[in-house]
């Protein structure tokens, strides 16, 4: 039979109710918070997006998918970002579409995707599906908006009613135009058609965003789109964006935070751990690689500037790289210098330390947080030493991220209460040191316990009367 232009097997597994709409282990659906800055569950509980780029998870056999899911769930991730793809194969050699015809989905491939989606739910993980990358939409549909919309209807129908599914309408959507902006009206119409097809089916019950190229935000082309629930940016694969004349993630987030209407925003692809710096600019795999400190800095800059969460990635995990021989390093012609097993990379220091970002934010009512750079006395530098600051709207807490442990002077008058408790939170360990208690008056200098490379700290200031627990604790 034909549904909206797509050929479906009558009564077969590609019928519209391909997956069960309910299961005992269903996660609560997500929605945008009342202040339009964060995400919450449908019962009002705050949700912190701690994502992992598992783009090519289709490459893994079921047992390996389980291993991956168990690992990331145990490490505190709340969501994974997965790209099914167009002219691609899964672990068993099944292509996504028969003869690469998007109107003829290959059930063997999509049954494997169904299992991945179900496994995420079973491990307590939300899953953000990226049906195709921008250039794939161009290859699959050209300028045919009717077929693009039909595809959106089909794939949304397959996962309709699954409360843990979100949609990233396109990966690097500007690749539909060779990464040149602006994309044409015809190209934008194709992407909008897919999004409208998705929304036609789920009626707004599954959140939607779109993923841009480097150092850009979805707000450039889609902020006003009614289907766009939250903005996503890609700060890209440079340790310091400023060093390459690019906007840093906190700058992009600050820009989007100021837009009307207000929408949540997050960095959906910062530099991956163990990626050579500026790999896609210099195309040199021998450049210094991003370490744990680099990925931590992007994360804390993001959330303290107003992001609703953050996405982590590892160079050997996103494509599930397994060396063909000991010591193999992938040449730039084949990839960005992958050099280790994805299994070992799951325990990379930066990845394991992402849980501390989430724990810190969840130890305070982060849904009341607003970015407040004016907490820092003097102008914060725009480069690697930039200090990002956030505080509660009622002034009951503040957090300031210090990338290299440099002393800073803070305006205390923006907070509330007669006395403040000051803590130093260690992003490497998740431990908090109670530093002092002081009057909330005027300006005060604070010096982190250590300083220098890999010595980042978070200063947490609490209204003493609130009795907040140690930062990062439940």
Image (cartoon, rainbow, N blue to C red):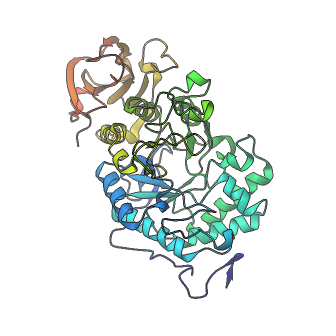
Residue at the image position 21 percent from the left and 20 percent from the top: 435
Residue furthest to the bottom in view is 11
Q: Quadrant of the N terminus?
A: bottom right
| Residue drawn at (43%, 52%) of the image | 322
Residue 394, picture quadrant: top left
Horizontal placement of 84 versus 386: left or right? right
Task: Specify whether 429 is left or right of 400.
Answer: left
86 in relation to 405, above or below? below
What residue is rendered at 69% in x and 46% in y? 174
Query: Along the line of sight, which residue is nearer the eye, 123 or 157?
Result: 123
Q: Residue 171, position in %: x, y?
A: 60, 51
Where is the C terminus found, in terms of image quarters? top left
Position above or below: 52 against 250: below
Instruction: Using the rendered view, name the quadrant where residue 290 is placed.
Output: top left
Residue 358 seen in render? no
Residue at the extreme front of the image, as rendered: 325
Establish if 23 lies above or below 234.
below
Nearer to us in this view, 182 or 399? 182
Q: Position of residue 67 (x, y in %)?
A: 33, 59
Q: Depth check: give the residue in front, 45 or 216.
A: 216
Q: Position of residue 153 (x, y in %)?
A: 63, 69
Q: Is residue 471 above or below residue 44?
A: above
In this rendering, would 437 be left or right of 343?
Answer: left
Kindly tell me whether residue 257 is visible in this rendering: yes
Q: How many marks?
A: 0
């Amino acid at each position: 039979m034909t549904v909206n232009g797509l050929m479906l097997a009558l009564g077969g597994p590609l019928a519209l109710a391909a997956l069960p709409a309910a299961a005992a282990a269903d996660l609560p659906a997500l929605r945008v918070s009342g202040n339009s800055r964060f995400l919450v569950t449908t019962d009002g509980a705050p949700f912190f997006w701690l994502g992992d780029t598992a783009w090519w998870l289709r490459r893994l056999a079921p047992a390996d998918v389980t291993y991956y899911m168990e690992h990331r769930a145990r490490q505190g991730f709340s969501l994974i970002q997965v790209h099914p793809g167009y002219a691609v194969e899964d672990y068993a050699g099944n292509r996504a579409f028969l003869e690469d015809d998007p109107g003829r989905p290959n059930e063997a491939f999509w049954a494997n995707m169904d299992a991945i989606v179900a496994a995420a739910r079973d491990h307590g993980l939300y899953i953000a599906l990226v049906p195709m990358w921008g250039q794939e939409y161009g290859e699959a549909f050209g300028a045919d908006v009717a077929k693009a919309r039909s595809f959106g209807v089909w794939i949304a129908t397959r996962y309709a009613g699954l409360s843990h599914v979100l949609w990233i309408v396109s990966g690097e959507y500007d690749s539909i135009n060779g990464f040149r902006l602006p994309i044409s009206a015809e190209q934008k119409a194709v992407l909008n058609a897919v999004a409208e097809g998705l929304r036609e089916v789920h009626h707004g019950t599954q959140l939607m965003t779109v993923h841009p190229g480097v150092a850009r935000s979805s707000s450039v082309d889609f902020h006003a789109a009614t289907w766009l629930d939250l903005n996503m940016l890609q700060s890209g694969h440079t340790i310091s964006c400023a060093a390459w004349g690019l906007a840093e993630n906190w700058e992009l987030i600050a820009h989007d935070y100021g837009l009307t209407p207000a929408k949540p925003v997050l960095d959906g692809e910062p530099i991956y751990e163990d990626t050579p710096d500026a790999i896609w600019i210099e195309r040199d795999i021998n450049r210094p690689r991003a370490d744990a400190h680099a990925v931590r800095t992007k994360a804390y800059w993001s959330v303290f500037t107003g992001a609703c969460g953050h996405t982590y990635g590892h160079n050997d995990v996103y494509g599930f790289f397994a060396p063909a021989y000991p010591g193999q390093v992938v040449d730039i012609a084949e990839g960005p210098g992958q050099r280790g097993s994805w299994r070992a990379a799951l325990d990379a220091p930066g990845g394991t330390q992402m849980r501390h970002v989430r724990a810190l934010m969840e130890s305070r009512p982060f849904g009341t947080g607003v970015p407040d750079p004016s907490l820092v006395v003097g102008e914060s530098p725009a480069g690697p030493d930039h200090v990002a600051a956030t505080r509660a709207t009622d002034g009951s807490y503040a957090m300031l991220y210090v990338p290299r442990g440099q002393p800073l002077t803070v305006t205390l008058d923006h907070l509330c209460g007669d006395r403040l408790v000051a803590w130093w939170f260690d992003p490497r360990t998740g431990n908090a040191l109670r530093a002092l208690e002081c009057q909330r008056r005027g300006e005060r200098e604070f010096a982190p316990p250590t300083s220098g490379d890999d010595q980042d700290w978070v200063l947490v200031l609490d209204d003493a009367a609130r009795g907040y627990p140690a930062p990062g604790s439940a």
